[in-house]
Amino acid sequence: MQRYFGRICEKQVILENDDVFHLTKVMRARVGEKIEIVDNGEVYQAEVKSLKPLHIALGKHINEKSELPNHVILVASLVKGDHMDLILQKATELGASEIVLLSTERTVVKIKKDDKDVKFARFNKILKEAAEQCKRKKIPYCYRLINISQLKDIKADVKLIAYEDEKGSSASFNKAVQNIKENQTIAIVIGPEGGFTQDEVELAFSLGYKVVGLGRRILRAETAAFYALSVISNFLERK
């Protein structure tokens, strides 16, 4: 069943205009069709009762576990082209709760102040669509762009930064992940295509971030994000 994030008011389902268009025009829903509605982290079965006007009746509550038990923050450096879109999509699929965008010395992509609202609206639309596709109960959020010194503002119990000069062993990363405790918030920082400078890594270290390696090979920025989140989510869901 197709999943939508909406609002429930007096057992009536209210969808955003884009979702109404998707349901009626793209998916060509028919009367009697069953869909899933998520409101405030709760999932319900619903049924299309009429199309003009659109009327969706709320059905039974669905119990499911699709969220990670811990709050996971991906701090991802801006990357070129559609690679940023891919990072947002896959981070959602891998259970990230929040994506913070990072601008570094070697970051090629820049977001102009005048373009910021439009860019973030687009990023959050990608997150919403990805959350619906992979059956999340919550949409990850992305609302801030920071520089390396602002890593101090990230509130997390476990703070990690992946650094390519630590290649050769993933032992430090694995150990850090295995030491994560219940309800702890985890932040993992991933660099840009050109990597972090030594000064940036040292600054992050001074701000409480543990420097970790992600294996013996140099990974592209998007691959590093997927790898790190995969390891974290695999460990958290084994509990």
Image (cartoon, grey):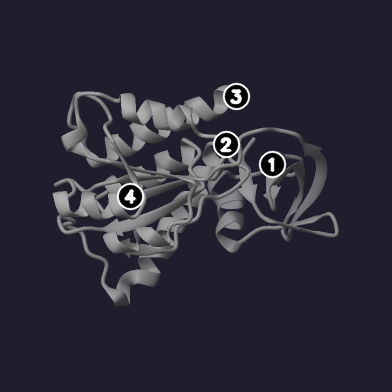
**Secondary structure under the numbered disc 1 in the rendered image:** strand
Q: CA distance from mark 4 to mark 2?
A: 19 Å
What residue would you read off at disc 3?
239
Q: CA distance from mark 3 to mark 1?
A: 28 Å
Which of the 4 image quarters holds residue 53? bottom right
> What kind of residue is marked 4?
Ala
Closer to the N terminus: mark 1 or mark 2? 1
Specify the quadrant that holds the C terminus: top right
Residue at screen point 42% across, 62% down = 153
> What kind of residue is marked 2?
Leu
Closer to the N terminus: mark 3 or mark 4? 4
Closer to the N terminus: mark 3 or mark 2? 2
**Secondary structure under the numbered disc 3 in the rendered image:** loop
Q: CA distance from mark 4 to mark 1?
A: 31 Å
Q: Is 40 rendered above or below residue 231?
A: below
What residue would you read off at disc 1?
36
Q: Residues within 10 Å of mark 3 (few under 14, many from 20)?
A: few
> What kind of residue is marked 3?
Lys
Q: Is 178 rendered above or below residue 85?
A: above
Mark nearer the viewer, 3 or 2: 3
